[in-house]
Image (cartoon, grey):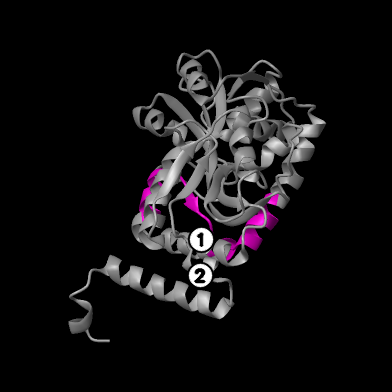
Amino acid sequence: MSDLFIRPFELRHWRKWLFAMALAVAAFGSGGPLAAQSYPERPVTMIVPFPAGGATDTLARYLGENMRQLLGQPIIIENVGGAAGTIGVGRTVRSPADGYTLSIGTSTTHMLTGGLYTLPFDLLKDIEPVIYIGSEPLLLAARKDFPADNLKGLIAYLKANPAKASVGIAGVGAQGHLAGIEFQKITGTRFTFVPYRGNAPAMQDLLAGQIDFMMEPSSNFKSLIATGSVKPIAVTGKARLPASPNIPTIEEAGLPGFTASLWYALWAPKDTPKDIVEKLNTALRAVLADATVKKRLDDLGIEISPRDQQSPQALRAFQKAEAERWWPVIKASNLKAE
């Protein structure tokens, strides 16, 4: 195709046209019902299981706007917080399986809570996986005057001072808490967990020197690292942070085999028609493939999932594997959600 034909159109409009054609071909080939082929015919609600303003809410609104441009209908964000996200997830479980109610959430809301709470639904069976969006590694960061400057030094200090160091956590059973428990087991160290009601008050005490270190989602520390207010030790992901390339991964720093991330994904009510799930999946795969979207998620500290892990089947397998890893940790530690 010649440049003379492409130039009158903006690249974004060209991508939209190709995406629309792909959806049309997929709908025709699937032989699905007319309702699935014409979906969506009205606004779609995406439930965020947290109050407005947090990382998940920010991600949902950004992705929702990009999905609107492809699906042709608004994505309405509804914040339903409470009980570590289980109230919002339960709202989705009870919603009609018609594709007009979606549930975006994290490894905490859609996996860890299954080990912490006795829920009236099964997180692995009663919601329909749509797509694994991406993950955010945790960052091990210490107060700026902590005596150790790197991971080996930190481990040596913890071994020389058993149970004396304190680590702030965003709540009992949160991702950082479980990662800390596993870290103790692997390194043979002991330290005291100090639970807070969220990351913000914990970080205030870290800045004030009231606690020694934290292991929480990396985006929480972005501004503190820039100002030198905390001492970054290592990232618990498999790759360094694009925004902070000087911070080593925990494996590079000397602890192979240890990874922990907060991950994000999208679900729908159980038994949502397969054609609708596939249409939603196709839309989000197109959104996540956009270079502008990737840059924005990089800024948020979120690494987009690999293309071969973006199918509904891959999300179901990943969610199950994560539950098999973390639920035994919860059980063995006798953790009870507050």
Indicate the quadrant containing the N terminus: top left, top right, bottom left or bottom right: bottom left
Of label 2 and label 1, which has the lower sequence position?
Answer: 2
- What predominant SS class does the magenta segment belong to? helix
| Residue bearing the label numbered 2 | 37
Determine the residue positioned at 37% across, 74% down.
Answer: 18
Q: Is residue 327 above or below residue 184?
A: below
Determine the residue positioned at 53% across, 33% down.
Answer: 80
Residue 9 location, quadrant: bottom left
Q: Residues within 10 Å of mark 2 (few under 14, many from 20)?
A: some
Q: Residues within 10 Å of mark 1 (few under 14, many from 20)?
A: many
User: Is disc 1 placed on a helix, strand or loop?
Assistant: helix
Q: Amino acid at mark 2?
A: Gln
Residue 213 location, quadrant: top right
Res. 175 in view:
no
| Residue bearing the label numbered 1 | 280
Camera-side residue: 127 or 138?
127
Camera-side residue: 215 or 135?
135
Determine the residue positioned at 46% across, 13% down.
Answer: 208
Q: Amino acid at mark 1?
A: Leu
Report, in whole angstroms, how far the alpha carbon at label 2 lies from the one at label 1: 12 Å
User: Is disc 2 placed on a helix, strand or loop?
Assistant: helix
Residue 311 sits inside the magenta stretch: yes
